[in-house]
Image (tube, rainbow, N blue to C red):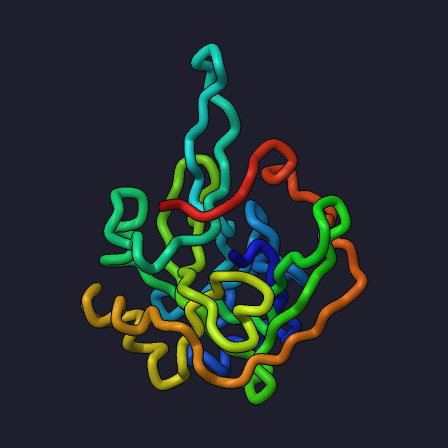
Amino acid sequence: MCNLYRLSVPLAEISALFDAASAPTGANLPAETYPGSPGIVIAAGQVRSMVWGFPLALTGKQGQPLKPKPVNNARSDKLDSAFWRASFASRRCLIPLTAWAEAEGPQGAKTRTWLSLPDQPVFACAGIWQPTAPWGDSYAMIMTDAVGAAATCHTRMPVILAQQDWQAWLDTSPEQAWALCVPYRGAIAIARTATPWAAPRSPRQASARTGTRA
């Protein structure tokens, strides 16, 4: 399950690589992206800044409304659920990144392990997005079963799309798009670090857990 990734190239390079309109004024390129914080996606032919995670309404023990939880990962086998169905049908996006991280190690002392594609400095993962009342436009990353080197870090991994499939993911029917939600079989580089997994939290993270929605 991916709860941290990075994109370490200029926005102009992203725009050129994905043949997408330049990001509007004010769009930022975060060094690292966490659930509940802004990230960069390609949607409707544009490089756009959105919040990573669909807001899930929560209530307290007394029925009082709590701050929403950012649900940042969507399992590929659950895309027909009510929570994801409409976005998967009509609002798919590409999520550019250079690496994603998994937490490894004992509880309380987990460190960051970075996974990347050695032959692709920038690659794209499958995503979906929706307009929301609390956060504006938000997106989620599609997850599938991990294989190969990625399976040594976690049981799931992002759906990595080959460049020739980018447009198909954006424009085809849900059935054709779902057929692209398969484990990546190419080479994956693993970089284990001593960097603690814990990191500064965004305001939304400070009061909400993150995760995958069934």
Q: Give whichever of 102, 83 is nearer the camera.
A: 102
Determine the residue positioned at 65% across, 35% down. 206
Residue 63: percent from the left, percent from the top? 43, 14
Q: Is residue 163 left or right of residue 60?
A: left
Question: What is the number of callouts on the image?
Answer: 0
Q: Where, by quadrant of the figure, is residue 179 drawn?
A: bottom left
Q: Residue furthest bottom?
A: 119
Viewer-proximal residue among 17 and 115: 115
Residue placed furthest toward the top: 62
Location of residue 152 with respect to 49 vertically, above or below: below
Image spot of residue 89 (x, y percent): 23, 58
Task: Name the residue at 47% across, 65% down.
Answer: 158
| Residue at image location 40% in from the left, 64% down from the top | 144
181 relative to 111 in the view: left or right: left
Measuring 59% from the left and 38% from the top, which residue is drawn there?
Answer: 204
Q: Is residue 47 visible?
A: no
Q: Is residue 51 left or right of residue 75?
A: right
Residue 101 pos. (x, y %)? 62, 63
Pick whichever, 135 or 73, lies toward us. Answer: 73
Measured as percent of width and height from the top left, residue 195 is found at: 79, 60
- Is any atom of residue 202 visible in this view? yes
User: Vertical placement of 73 versus 13: above or below?
Assistant: above
